[in-house]
Amino acid sequence: MKLKLAALAAAAVMAAAPAMADLVVPNLSYRTGPYGANGTQYADGFNDYFTLLNERDGGIGGEKIQVPECETAYNTEKGVECYESTKADALVFNPLSTGITYQLIPKVAVDKKVLYTPGYGRTSAKDGTVFEWVFNAPANYWDGASVAIKYLLDENGGSLEGKKIALVYHNSAYGKEPIRTLQELGKKHGFTLTEIPVEAPGQEQKSQWLQIRRDKPDYVLMWGWGVMNQVAIQEAANIRFPMENFIGIWWAGSELDVMPAGDGANGYKSMTFNGVGMDYPLYDDLKTHVIDTGKASQGGEHVGSAVYSRGMYAAVVIAEAIKKAQELAGTSAITPEQLRDGFEQLDITPERLAEIGLPDFGPEVKMSCANHGGSGMSRVQQWDAAAKKWNLITEFTAPDAEVLDPLIAADSAAYAQESGITPRTCE
Amino acid sequence: MFYREAGDFKTSYRDDGQTFPIKLDRIGYYAILAIAVLVIPFVINDYWASAVLLPFLIYAIASIGLNILVGYAGQVSLGTGGFMAVGAFAVYKLMTAFPEISVVIHILLAGGITALVGIAFGLPSLRIKGFYLAVATLAAQFFLVWLFNKVPWFYNYSASGQINSPERTVLGWAVTGPAASPSAKYLICLAFVFMAAWVARNLTRGMVGRKWMAIRDMDIAAEIIGVNPLTAKLTAFGVSSFFIGIAGALLFAVYLGAAEVTEAFGINKSFLVLFMVIIGGLGSIFGSFAGAAFLVLLPVFLKNLLVGTLGWPTDLAAHIELMIVGALIIFFLIVEPHGLARLWRLVKEKLRLWPFPH
């Protein structure tokens, strides 16, 4: 019985290995579990862009792109299983989970695979001298925190002296990331920071919002994900916190988060590094080649939503990096090493974005051997509850490098020391 | 036919009291051990190690630990996740504070630290029983996770509260860290599993184990015949937590390599290990292995079957997988409430009589 089971399992594992010869970009997605609603949209956007490239252009440089999907349920143990089962031919991983990213950072360095974590993961991975295989352009959490504070500075005529800012965060690696930066920024700009943790998954936030009602902070920042966002926005509406003073990070800025609160969510703001909606020329192609032919991931019901667009943006950057790598290597069947070089030489200009059919969709992304995080620019969007859409209200803004660079250097040096890595020199 | 005692003569008390009194059992045991030590390390790859064998071995240690407490001593505990976190954070602090000392010693010390914590949280068991004790251990679960999330000293003040296991070697082979080979990771876990099962088996059939079982069966009667409930209950908590701590240390250091306390050691982990013990069989070492195998291997197997072989969409497969595992749990508990170990015992009894059952 046991032997038979083992033999069956072995057969199943063999069959699971994808066919060779194409470029393989695994999609470690989560469509189940506490964050399934968000993960589904992201995974659809990611899949659909590669489907579009395969259908319209026959892949990239003549090579079809294979996107085998593996369900992680936002669980690190399943994430390990997915990574191991898909890594054989894989070029690049994008697990959409800070926890899984932390797990994979040491592993990809040994297995020589690229790890691309746009807008999440370990912030100090921006330092390419220590994190050779990890990229987190266009923006990371510290960039997001800094741009949010910059936006508030603009709102307040350049000074936040004496203001109170509360940070409502998911009490996990993800939510804790911005604290250090916000503390530093607080010292620099003279605002006081209150840290208010919310235990995952975050359905229960009564006491947190009671504290906010009592403390009356001028602004509330939020690092939330999944159901935590919906509850927080609802609670903020319940205590009549002025929504325009409530800013979420990009992961707290999807339609799913604001819809349940109805009109109460009107005016809520969030950071973003990608455009939303379907007013981009690319969607015409997507409609002809993917949606109308019935090849859209899960039927295409989320096309154009904020999280879908972000998944698509991740796929755009990966596709551009593959293209760059093919140019540099002079061959279309690239290896992960060549893809890493492609990422390091990547330069997505606004003109190139317009050429793809996504003008002004994301910030300019320019990476180098030492800078794996791009410019870090992001912008603010605001929810219009009546029209049920997000409006972009600022241009792309650069973060405060004066504060961030020393923090990144310190954190990556700590990682290098802890893991016994000698930072490479970049020419 | 296959499975007979006839002709298997015992000439000493030692022989009579051995763990596997039947010859076929003994041969099977040595054969499994030989395959595990001499064959698997040479054929194992990353996928088999990380997705199948490491979690199976590590959860087997955890369920042996919990089985001592729940199955042998009758004290219900929902604090397993918290105690595993103690093991993980203890080994992390030791590994980073004393890098020159062997990681094997660190893992054992982490077990020891967890044993002390377990004894401390076991103290209420002297006054409260049953469901009330379960609630008290649930408090341990939430308190410990909160503690490791709240106090930055435990995670060496890292920005995110994540802990990463640095590379450590045993006899020149890296067993932790990203560069560790799958066979090295497998062998270190196998060594600890072997030790845990060996110790647990010998403890449970000795005086200590008999005291635990006496307390389990009726604590007042046990007290009357001279079993001290204080030492019996606290040793059960201590030994159980020792194994659970080792499992937590291995889970973090060898298997995952990085961990976040709320995600890796939440209440779900407590339930998972408790289910392993219940499905495997309370009060059985074999049951601990069977339960761990059932709950670790079955989801992986189903995932590979549904997604890999049949090509189903991943989300559908994930949902169906939950339903199948859930249905099988209910099925097994209805058909055999005493777990897979009891099922195995029945099979053995049938085999002894086969082919002449009357």
Image (cartoon, rainbow, N blue to C red):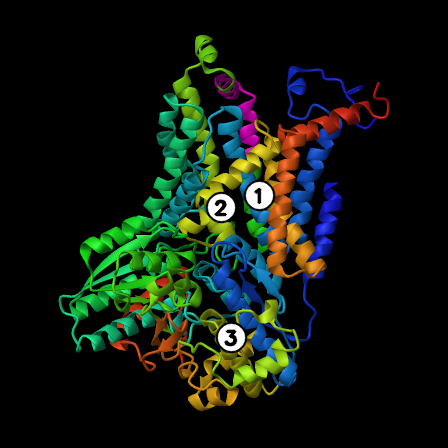
Estimate how packed mark 2 is, as few (under 14), some (14 to 19) or many (20 or more) residues with alpha carbons within 10 Å.
Answer: many
The CA span between labels 2 and 1 is 10 Å
Name the residue nearer the viewer: A68 or A325: A68
Estimate how packed mark 3 is, as few (under 14), some (14 to 19) or many (20 or more) residues with alpha carbons within 10 Å.
Answer: many
Asked if the stretch drawn in magenta spans residue B312, the answer is: no
Q: Secondary structure at mark 3?
A: helix
Q: Secondary structure at mark 2?
A: helix
- Residue drawn at the location 30% of the way across and 69% of the way down: A145
Give the residue furthest to the top.
Answer: B224
The CA span between labels 3 and 2 is 38 Å
In this figure, which residue is indicated by the disc labeled 3?
Answer: A312
Disc 2 and disc 1 in contact, CB within 8 angstroms: yes
Asked if the stretch drawn in magenta spans residue B196, the answer is: yes
User: Which chain's residue wears label 3?
Assistant: A
Q: Please indicate whether residue A319 sits to the left or right of residue B92 in the image.
A: right
Q: Amino acid at mark 2?
A: Leu
Q: Amino acid at mark 3?
A: Met
- The mark nearer the N terminus, 2 or 1, is 1
Is the same chain shared between marks 3 and 2?
no
- Give the magenta-colored segment's residue range: B195-215
| Residue A360 shows in this picture | yes
In this figure, which residue is indicated by the disc labeled 2?
Answer: B250
In this figure, which residue is indicated by the disc labeled 1?
Answer: B57
Q: Quadrant of residue A400?
A: bottom left
